[in-house]
Image: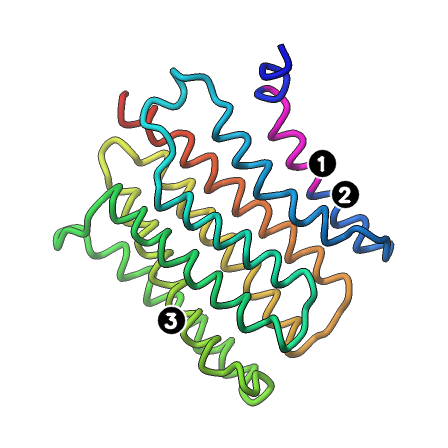
Amino acid sequence: MRMEWIRRNILTLFWVILFIHCLFHFLHLPFVGISKLLLLPSLLVYLFTRRKEEALAGINFFYLVAIVFAFIGDMLLVIINDLLFLPGMISYIVNLFFLCIFFLQLHKIHLHQLLRPLLVLLVLAVIGYFVYGFLGDKLKQFQLPVLVYMCFVAITAALAMNTTQHPQLRRTGWLFFIGILVFIVSNTILVLNRFHFLYHNLYIAVMLTYGTAQYLLARGVALVSKDVQS
């Protein structure tokens, strides 16, 4: 009975934790960091407590490794400062690397399906060029790490788009692609606020988009086996 209750309510709990986290930040209340660190574990609980018929293929190993490094990044960025910002960024780069492997496992790259991924790379390259140019010297010692990070994000988005071309994973692939796009929006707001705007409450937009992105990715992982079986 208790497991059934968790299974039915864990995603609702995820959104409650996210909004509590944003509220605590807005009101300058304590335990903001703790609420942030409950987000990804709640999504893992969701994935691991699904009924057997809803988890026919289990949970992909590479996605699990990716979410572990995302959690490490979350821990490192609980306190935003120059000392922990670079290790946090590296953790998210590793997260993106394993997501890339996961997406490639779902659907390999085929020459006749290159158009959509290349268009995604092109659009993100143009956007990245303007964002990077806008920040310029404000990035200071983080210029190279931010550039590398932007490249990984763009590649991840292109590979997520590639999954939408799998004949059995179109619905799931769009969840992945939209999730990565929302993740990019979150990262863009974060870096602009970290190095330019410095608005305290803009962090709320960062977390709402970040939480939405992780939710969409987890939902996609949950649907992978069902889509393949259908």
215 displayed left or right of 65: right
What residue is at 41 percent from the left and 60 percent from the top? 94
Which of disc 2 and disc 3 is earlier in sequence?
2
Q: Is residue 13 magenta?
A: yes
Circles 2 and 1: CB atoms closer than 8 Å: yes
Relative image position of residue 69 (x, y in whole percent) = 48, 54
Q: Is residue 174 magenta?
A: no
Circle 2 residue: 20
Going by the numbered disc 3, the residue's amino acid type is Ala
Going by the numbered disc 1, the residue's amino acid type is Val
Magenta stretch prevailing secondary structure? helix
Circle 1 residue: 16
> Which image quarter: residue 196?
bottom right
Which of disc 1 and disc 3 is earlier in sequence?
1
121 displayed left or right of 180: left
Going by the numbered disc 2, the residue's amino acid type is Ile
**Mark 2: secondary structure:** helix
**Mark 3: secondary structure:** helix
Q: CA distance from mark 3 to mark 1?
A: 35 Å
Part of the protein shown in magenta: 8-17
Graded by Cα atoms within 10 Å as few (under 14), some (14 to 19) or many (20 or more), the crowding at tag 2 reads some
- In the figure, 49 relative to 87: above or below? above
**Mark 1: secondary structure:** helix
Q: CA distance from mark 2 to mark 1?
A: 6 Å
- In the figure, 92 relative to 217: above or below? below
What residue is at 36 percent from the left and 58 percent from the top? 97
Viewer-nearest residue: 142 or 192: 142
Which is in the foreground here, disc 3 or disc 1? Answer: 1
Circle 3 residue: 125
Which is in the foreground here, disc 3 or disc 2? Answer: 2
